[in-house]
Amino acid sequence: MSNRIVKAAVMVAACLTSLAATQRLSAQSMEHNRIGSWEFGIAGGALFLDTSLRGFLGSGAPEYMFANTSNPSSIMPSAEARIGYNFTKHFNVSGSMIGEFGSGMFFLTPTAAITLTTDVNATTAPFFRFGSEITRITGENERLTHSSYGVFAGIGLRHMLTDNMALNLEGRLRADKYQEVPMVRAMTYNPMAQIGLSWFGRGHRDREVTKMRVDTVRVDRVRVDTVRSVRVDTVRMAAPAMPAPAPARPRELFTLKAVLFEFDKATLTRGAKDTLGVAVRYLQDHSDVRVEIQGNTDSKGSDEYNMALGLRRAESVKEYLSSKGIDAGRIRTMSKGESEPVADNEINGKDNPAGRALNRRVVVIELP
C-alpha cells in the first residue's frame, strides 16, 4: 500500500507543479463562451494496480485465477470516454465509461463526477474532479467480480488548442471496496494518469447585439390663415423648413486594450486573436455590416510616428479579419494616433504608465 501512496503523491505533486507554472495564464480568457455547453472527451493513460488487488487477481489454482499469470502486471493501459455539461464557468457534471485491460483481464468502470474549474472560458485552467464509480472485473475462465462501491478524486490541467478543442492532463486516485473478495484488505487504492482531448459545443452567446433605436420626428400640419382687406387676398404661410435628421452615429462594437498590444508594437497577441473571434462571428452572422478599425497610441514618440503606429495596428486587425473570410471591402482603417486618449499619459508632469497602457488600443465600430 505504501508503494501505491508514494506513486499517488508523486502524480499529485507533478500536477501541482504544472498548475503553479501556468496559473498566471488562466486570467487570459478567450471570448468564446463555454457556459451552457456540452463537453465530449476521450482520454488514454495508465492504471496502477493496488498490491492487494494484484495479489488476489493472480492467486489460486490456474483454473480459478482471474489473471493469466500469477504475477499480473502492475500497470494496465486505460481508455475513457466522457460526456458532461458546463452549468457555470466553475461547475460541470459528467458521466464516463473507463476500460482497462492487461494480463488476460478487462476492467469496465462507469463513473459519475463533478468537476470544479477556475474558469471554463480561460485559455489555460486547472480543475478538480471527484465522483463515484463501480468497477466490474472480467478475467480468465469466465471469472467475474465487481466492487461494492468506489470513489475517486483527481486534479488536472486544461489548455485550449482552439475555440472548441482542449488538451487535458489529469492525475486521479481511485478507491474501490471489494467486500466480498477474500483479500488482505477490502479497500484498494489505484492511482491513474491520463492525457486526452475535449470538444465543447456551442455555449450561450458572448454578447447581445442591441438594436439601433429609431426616433420618429412628428411634423405638425401647416396652418393656413386668411387675411381680409379691401380686396380679399389669401395669404399662405409656409412652415419653416424642418432640419434634416441627424445621421446615425457609428456604434462601437468593442475595444482591444493595452494587454493585447505591447509598447511600440502592432503585432496581434494570442489574446487579441481570441477577442477578435467575437468580431469574426458577428461579421459572419451580419453580412451587410461594415466596420471601421481605429488605431490609437499613447503619447510616447512624435505625432507622425504615432499616426503611423496607430495605422499599423488597425491594419493588423483588418488582415486578421480578412484571413478569417471577412471581405476586406467591408473594413476600413484609420489612425487616431495620440489625439484621442481615454486616460492621462502624464500626471503632474510625471509619466503615467497605467494611463498610457489604456491609450494603446484599437477600437472597432460599426458604420451606419
Image (cartoon, grey):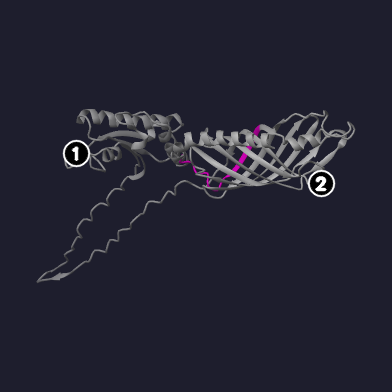
Quarter of the picture containing the N terminus is top right
Please report the residue visible at 76 percent of the width from the left and 37 percent of the height from the top.
53
Q: Which residue is mark 2?
A: 180
- Report which quarter residue 286 is drawn in: top left
Q: Position of residue 305 (x, y in %)?
A: 23, 28
In the image, residue 334 above or below residue 202: above
Q: Position of 270 compared to 219: left or right?
A: right
Q: Position of residue 131 (x, y in %)?
A: 65, 47
Which is more foreground, mark 2 or mark 1? 2
Q: Position of 101 compared to 232: left or right?
A: right
Query: Label 1's element?
Result: strand
> How busy is the neighbourhood of tag 1: few (under 14 within 10 Å), some, or many (20 plus)?
few
> How busy is the neighbourhood of tag 2: few (under 14 within 10 Å), some, or many (20 plus)?
few
Specify the amino acid type for callout 2. Glu
Front residue of 203/186: it is 186
Specify the amino acid type for callout 1. Lys
Sequence-earlier tag: 2 or 1:
2
The stretch drawn in magenta includes residue 359 = no
User: Real-space Cα distance between discs 2 and 1?
Assistant: 77 Å
- Report which quarter residue 360 is drawn in: top left
Instruction: Give the label on residue 364, or none.
Output: none
Q: Position of residue 45 (x, y in %)?
A: 66, 32
Q: Which residue is mark 1?
A: 350
The stretch drawn in magenta includes residue 33 = yes
Q: Position of residue 98 (x, y in %)?
A: 70, 38
Query: Label 2's element?
Result: loop
Front residue of 261/54: it is 54
Magenta segment: 30-44
Front residue of 258/43: it is 43
Q: How many marks?
A: 2
Please report the residue visible at 40 percent of the width from the left and 31 percent of the height from the top.
269
